[in-house]
Image: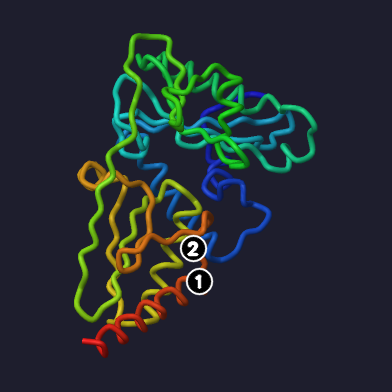
Amino acid sequence: MRVVDPGEEHWRYISLCTHVDEVRPDHLLAAEMRLRWLKSQSEFCGMRTKVAVGEDGRILGFIHMIPIGSPLSGMVGKDLMAIPCLTINYQLVYTQKRGTGVGRALVQACEQEAMRRGFKGLAAYAYGGDFWFMPSAFFQKVGFARVSEGSNIWVKKWGDAKDPVEPKVHYQHEPISGKVVIDYFWSPFCFTVCNEIINIREAASEFGDRVELREYRADDPESFARYGMLRALFINGEPKGWGYEAPREKLREEIAKAIQNLRLAKVED
């Protein structure tokens, strides 16, 4: 196994976020959106991607790293690089009874890159329990420590740097008379989110001028500084979420329900 900078032969896999065995037409649209954005970030905000490749050329996983000053780190801090995503080929994980070593190799490559660029450590959001994405047990195994009890931020430092903190979240619903308002905070960084914005746009358009869709780009520094949110969906101020991408049929149900509530409220007035 070796860890390399991505070449053209790797970007399709990265843009699809390992979903290469179940590609749907909407997946291709989401992957194209994500790919354009990822390639722009190395110049725009210093994002780097590393790919683990087997001896047979098979892609085993990838990792993204980004300076903590970027909104996509989801943290407030300095002197560190953040790891917003570490993804390992799911077939590799499912068919091996013990650790693959891929995750450790990718994190080590990030450490070397961060040191070379003068950063003083790495940070990552990591989760315990049954949450499968970015498991805290793995990050603890490779030398990360939780910044404080109850926090999901983990760090590994080799220099004098302050621990990062979570951003302060600010959101206040601003209604529009007679309309259902959808507020969506998103960026093209995540494949699931790219699928989600496609679903949200299509579901909202089906209801015409009865729905106002307001999009907030989490990768915009001003928007992130104002709201502190990377991904969030509100329908008339009520938070909605399914964990995975918001399904179109569920979005339609929620929008139709919100329209009905507006009608009932108007009758009561």
Of the numbered discs in the image, which one, if any, rests on residue 20? none
149 vs 207, left or right, is right
Q: Position of residue 264 (x, y in %)?
A: 32, 86
Could you tell me the amino acid type at mark 1? Answer: Lys
| Residue 128 lies in quadrant | top right
Q: Residue at x 69, y 34 (%)?
A: 57
Distance CA(mark 1)–CA(mark 2):
7 Å
- Mark 2 nearby-residue class (10 Å; few <14, some 14–19, many ≥20): many
Indicate whether 120 appears above or below 45: above
- How far across and how far down the image is residue 104, in percent? 61, 23
Q: Position of residue 170 (x, y in %)?
A: 25, 48
At 37% across and 35% down in the image, what residue appears? 73
For image coordinates 47% across by 77% down, the residue present is 253
Task: Point out residue 59 in the picture as x, y percentages from the top left corner.
Answer: 65, 37
Q: Residue at x 30, y 81 (%)?
A: 262
Quadrant in the picture for the N terminus: top right
Residue 260 drawn above or below residue 162: below
| Amino acid at circle 2 | Ala
In-image side of 122 versus 134 (left or right) = left
Q: Say what secondary structure mark 1 lies in.
A: helix
Q: Residue furthest top?
A: 159
Q: Are marks 1 and 2 in contact (CB under 8 Å)?
A: yes
Disc 2 element = loop
Residue on which the image places disc 1: 250
- What residue is shown with label 2? 246
104 vs 90: above or below: above
Res 21 → quadrant: bottom right
